[in-house]
Each structure stands twice: as structure tokens, then as C-alpha cells.
Amino acid sequence: MGRIMGHWLAQAGSVNHHGEAMQPGSRPSPSENGSAQQLLRALPPDLFFAEPLFDALPDVVFFVKDEQARYVLVNKTLVARCGLREKSALLGRDTTQVFASRFGTNYLAQDRAVLSTGTEIHDQLELHLYPNRDPGWCLTHKIPLRDASGRIIGLAGISRDLAMPDKKHPVYQRIAAAAHFIQENYDQQVQITQLASLASLSVSQIERYFKKIFYLSPRQMLVKARLEAATRMLAGDSSITDVAIACGYHDHSAFSRQFKATVGVTPTEYRGMLHGEQ
């Protein structure tokens, strides 16, 4: 835990007194450096003093893990999503000791990739299966934490539930029409140019407005629509191939790859979990 604090200390020198991130190689002015040091001295010894703020966010899962991918800090939302009562039940454990085996193994592999390569994960659309078996969509972010020498000593992450669309946005109606087209035609090969034409916008505009209004890219919304339909069908007895074709995939393997990349398990494994199998 102490070494992870070094990440936050190291980051303090990377922000100027306006709160703006500084580019690598740039140097703070004497006044900026002094302001950062004054702030550090004024902070409580435990730089995770803001933990209660994350506890107040019911739609955001927050966690910090050590270099072995074990939880060292979690918020109440994560505890509740895991069907637990106390944070202590998570601390010191990795995901394989917390989640159903197939999910836990996949999450651990993702953590290890961040820890070993330093690669950040941003806005990764994921479908989580909660303890009551209800699916929930979220966007996940994970970043490596480094000590003062630059060595990776942990990671921090959040998974944010997808928010309701911003219906007050001036182009909402046009973007909503494109989103409705996706919902009605997810079994087809929907093209971004089709959506742009439908909304009377350029391709770049519809990409930008989708993110602003729905917090998803058009492609992410298409994947979400397809996999939502797939999860409903997997509760029945249709074959995996039939589910794939009905959800717009040309073959079983393409569907399985997309499903596992988003959900963390294969369609067959997901079906088994819906029926109580581990």
C-alpha cells in the first residue's frame, strides 16, 4: 500500500497550479512546483482520503490493486456488486477468489496485462453478470500505478454504469433516430455511413454526438444491441449458431470472439452460468 502512494506523489509534479496536466519533459515553474509541494504537505498522510467520495457513487465501481492484482482499496459499490457486506471480504484477494471462476480468470488476465505492459484501458464496453444473475453494462477504465522510478507497482480502475442519454442535447432527436435504427436492425450489417445519412450528419459528427449523448460510439451501441439480444436468447434453448445468426454475426466463431471480449466468457459458458453452473 505504501509503495502505491508513490504513484500519487509522483503525479503531483505533473500537474501545474491551474490543475492542467503537463506534457512529458516539461518543467514546472518555481511557483508551480512550490504550489504542488504545498498541496502535498497539506494533504492527510493517507492520500486515499477521498475514498468516501467513491463510496457515495452507486453507479461507479472503484478499486486499487497491488502488483499481484490483489485488492488494496475498494468502494462500497464494488462490495455490493459482489454480493458482500464488508470491504474486508475483498481486500488481499484477486478476482479469481471473488467472482465466478470463468469471469474471475478473465478479469485477472486483464489486470495482469495492465501490470506487465503498462497498457491503459479506456472506455471498454463490458457486460457484467451480478449476483442476482441480472446483466449490467458498464464502461471500464484501468491505469497502471508507478513509483517515483517509473516501476509499475499496482493499478487503479473504475467501471461506470452506462448513463441515461442526454435528451436535452440539441441534436438528440437526430441521434436518437440513428440509435433506434441500430436497435431495430442489429441483425443486419449496419454501416456508420447509413447512420450519418439518417441523421443528416457527417461521419465524424455522428461519432462525436453519439459519445456525447449516449456515452458510446455507434459501433459500441451496435455491439451492445447485438449482445443484449444474445443474452436473452441464451436463456432459451436455441443453438449458439442460431443465436449468432439472429444477432447479426456471419458465423459462430466471430460471435463467440465478440461475446467473450465483451462479457468475459464464451456464449456456452454464459448459458451455463444462467443455469447455475460454475
Image (cartoon, grey):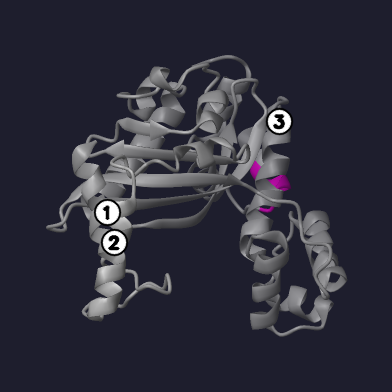
Residue sitting nearer the eye, 8 or 247? 8
Residue 222 or residue 10, whichever sits in front: 10
Residue carrying label 3:
238
Residue 194 image position (x, y, % from top left): 75, 75
Q: In this view, does 99 lie above or below 64?
A: above
How far is the residue under mark 1 from the one under mark 2?
5 Å
Q: Which dot marks residue 256?
A: none
Residue type marked 2: Gln
Q: Name the residue under label 1.
A: 41
Nearest the eye: 249 or 93? 93
Q: Judge the density around disc 2: few (<14), some (14-19), many (≥20) Cα neighbours within 10 Å.
A: few
**Dots 1 and 3: beta carbons under 8 Å?**
no
Mark 1 / mark 3, whichever is N-terminal: 1
* Residue 245 lies in the magenta stretch: yes
In the figure, is residue 123 to the left or right of 206? left
Inter-mark Cα distance, 2 to 3: 63 Å
Total numbered labels placed on residues in the image:
3
Position of 264 with respect to 177 (left or right) is: left
Instruction: Please give the name of the residue rendered at 45% of the width and 24% of the height, measured from the top-left corner.
Output: 99
